[in-house]
Image (spheres, rainbow, N blue to C red):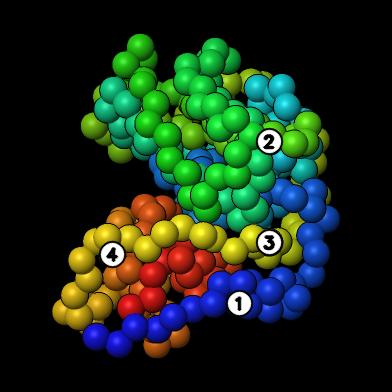
């Protein structure tokens, strides 16, 4: 089986030099990919009329202390809009929240809220996280449709990243429809969608131990946005086969050739 080794630092550098700098905060990089957060649903096209956040789901950055889905950023007010058709993911008594980080900032804590109350805290003690981060959160105190606010508190700045994830705890239905938001929606109008910010840090995730086979690679389908990929799924992109390393919902502009070694392993 032929292996193709990618060089993420060089690849990301070329991407960064070819893209315009977004008007959002320069270090705005991190979002919950699965269960798909509201911004992930916008980026994947699952939900329409999302405004600027659909182009940069990683950019809901604001000062620490907010309890709003958009962190109080007026440009991303759609994240607070309960009238949009957010899809709730069916989960059990616990759920694993998977983050994709395009800039690995030193981290103080990760905090998860339901109905404005913290239900889980993970203390990173100001360390640098991996390119993907997962937390399993106990939801056994709740049932039915809830909106989980996931907050990434940066360790060396006063900023945090905000994600709302709609879940249906113990549910078996379609998981769609309205839900009670954690905070009231803001009314500020969104700004003109900026260009997607290119990743600024090369991932350093270690190689996976999963066994790969040539038959799996040959049967891989073409990569596409808006698809929920599982670990070990195989796709093809621009003539190269890739194996999924981290479960996530794909979005436009973060193709396997860009996310080599963070989400995908070239075969």
Camera-side residue of 30 and 157: 157
Left or right: residue 179 versus residue 64 is left
Crowding near the residue tagged with mark 2, few <14, some 14–19, many ≥20 C-alpha atoms within 10 Å: many
- Residue 176 visible in the picture: no
- Inter-mark Cα distance, 2 to 1: 26 Å
Mark in the foreground, 4 or 1: 1
Of the numbered discs 4 and 1, the one sitting upstream in the chain is 1
Of the numbered discs 2 and 1, the one sitting upstream in the chain is 1
Mark in the foreground, 3 or 4: 3
- Inter-mark Cα distance, 2 to 4: 32 Å
Element on which disc 3 rests: loop
Q: Is residue 211 above or below residue 126?
A: below
Of the numbered discs 2 and 4, the one sitting upstream in the chain is 2
What residue did someone put label 4 on? 233
Element on which disc 1 rests: helix
Left or right: residue 254 versus residue 200 is left
Question: The C terminus is located in which quarter?
Answer: bottom left
What residue did someone put label 1 on? 11
Crowding near the residue tagged with mark 1, few <14, some 14–19, many ≥20 C-alpha atoms within 10 Å: some
What residue did someone put label 3 on? 200
Say which quarter of the image contains residue 62.
top right
- Inter-mark Cα distance, 4 to 1: 23 Å
Element on which disc 2 rests: strand
Query: For the point 58% across and 15% down, which residue is it?
Result: 116
Left or right: residue 58 versus residue 18 is left
- Inter-mark Cα distance, 3 to 1: 11 Å
Element on which disc 4 rests: loop
Are the two marked residues, 4 and 1, in contact with CB atoms closer than 8 angstroms?
no
- Inter-mark Cα distance, 3 to 4: 26 Å
Query: For the point 33% across and 60% down, which residue is it?
Result: 208
Of the numbered discs 2 and 3, the one sitting upstream in the chain is 2
What residue did someone put label 2 on? 154
């Amino acid at each position: 089986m032929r292996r193709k080794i990618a060089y993420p630092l060089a690849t990301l550098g070329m991407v960064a030099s070819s893209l315009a700098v977004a008007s959002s905060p320069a270090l705005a990089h991190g979002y919950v990919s699965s269960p798909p957060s509201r911004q992930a649903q916008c980026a994947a096209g699952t939900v329409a009329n999302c405004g600027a956040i659909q182009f940069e789901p990683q950019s809901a950055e604001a000062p620490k202390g907010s309890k709003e889905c958009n962190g109080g950023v007026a440009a991303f007010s759609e994240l607070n809009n309960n009238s949009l058709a957010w899809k709730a993911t069916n989960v059990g008594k616990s759920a694993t929240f998977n983050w994709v980080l395009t800039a690995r900032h030193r981290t103080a804590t990760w905090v998860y809220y339901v109905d404005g109350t913290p239900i889980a805290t993970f203390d990173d003690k100001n360390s640098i996280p991996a390119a993907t981060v997962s937390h399993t959160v106990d939801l056994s105190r709740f049932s039915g449709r809830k909106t989980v606010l996931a907050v990434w508190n940066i360790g060396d700045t006063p900023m945090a990243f905000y994600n709302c994830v709609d879940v249906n705890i113990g549910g078996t239905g379609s998981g769609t429809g309205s839900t009670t938001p954690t905070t009231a929606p803001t009314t500020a109008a969104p700004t003109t969608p900026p260009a997607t910010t290119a990743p600024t840090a090369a991932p350093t995730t270690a190689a996976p131990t999963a066994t790969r086979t040539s038959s799996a690679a040959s049967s891989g389908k073409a990569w596409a946005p808006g698809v929920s990929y599982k670990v070990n799924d195989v796709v093809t992109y621009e003539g190269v086969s890739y194996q999924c390393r981290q479960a996530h919902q794909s979005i436009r502009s973060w193709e396997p050739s860009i996310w080599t070694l963070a989400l995908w392993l070239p075969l």
